[in-house]
Amino acid sequence: MRCIKGGVSMRKSRNIVRTGKKVRLGADVISVNILAYVVVGAFAIVCLVPFYLIIVASFTPETSLIKNGYPIFPTGEFSLESYGLCLKNPVQILWAYGTTMGVTLAGTCLAVIMSTMTGYVLSRKDFPWRNKFAFFFFFTTLFSGGLVPTYMLCIRYLHFKNNYLALILPMMFSVWNMIIAKSFMAGIPDSISESAKMDGASDFLIYVRLILPLSKPLIATLGLFSALAYWNDWYNSMLYITDEEKFMLQYYLQRMLGSAEAMRLVAEKSGMPITTVPLESMKMAMTVIATGPIVLLYPFVQRYFVKGMTIGAVKG
């Protein structure tokens, strides 16, 4: 009788009750789920509000922004002047978009290949120098050679002036991405590689046929990190690119905004009459133009991104 009573009490104390094929959640589990959805939803709203304000401000006239500030809700006033100025030279914008997309695609593919290959080698327990190489990679993150030596190396010896390689190679390898890849691949069972070796497969074939298919979450995570880094890069364009047809989108928009600010400043100092340039709404329009395409990338890799970060951060 005690065993029967104990079993009944244990069933009652469970949070999940099974009735046939259906699963009924307990009240405490439902409460926790509701609270979690509310907190996550509130956090998502907080993250989306700034971008919403940017979109609304980009369609608001400059005079209204100066007088009333950034509106929370769209006002009756509507203006496309800022977008008209940003897209005044559509051919140049398209060139910048094409350059940015090409560099982002090529750089992301190379960065993922480099990070996953290095992480796979360093995660192999039969590689005797893996700890030494890992320390060497980590040691390089403590300091850098500086701007002047790097610039002289790229311009004088590597001839990267007005070369697309100057936009790809400096950001192709990241120690942080390599550490994520190493941690993720260390969780893949060694028996998979050992069984493939017994069948005569080479290390590269194991990496291509077995390791990469099992590392889809990792590839999505590293791809998203690398794509964001390449898309938002303007520094390398400023250093190594003078040909306007090879400007990255971020650098092209920054130059446009800098020219508008300089024009208005000169007019104010000299007292010359000049048409009002909508700098504030222009900044918002540039943000929308620059971030719009890359924002669409995240929904496609969301589930892999979360899984890759979780598995890569847990040591089994």
Image: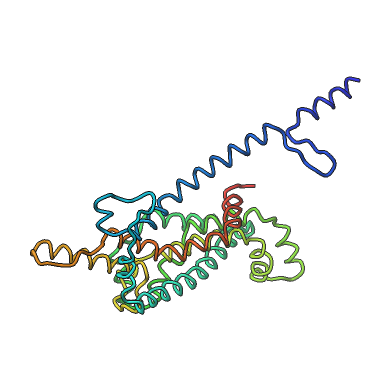
Foreground of the two, 30 or 252: 30
Which quarter of the rendered picture does the N terminus lie within? top right
Measured from the top left, where is residue 314 in percent x and y? Answer: 60, 47
Please give left or right for residue 201 compared with residue 266 in the image. Answer: right
Please give left or right for residue 76 compared with residue 194 in the image. Answer: left
Foreground of the two, 102 or 288: 288
Which colour scheme appears in the figure?
rainbow
Q: Residue furthest right?
A: 1
- Residue found at x 39% / y 62%: 288
Quarter assignment of residue 123: bottom right
Measured from the top left, where is residue 202 in percent x and y? Answer: 68, 71
Q: Residue furthest top?
A: 2
- Residue found at x 43% / y 66%: 230
Please give left or right for residue 228 compared with residue 209 in the image. Answer: left
Position of residue 165 relative to residue 286, above or below, is below
Measured from the top left, where is residue 291 in percent x and y? Answer: 42, 62
- Residue found at x 53% / y 60%: 298
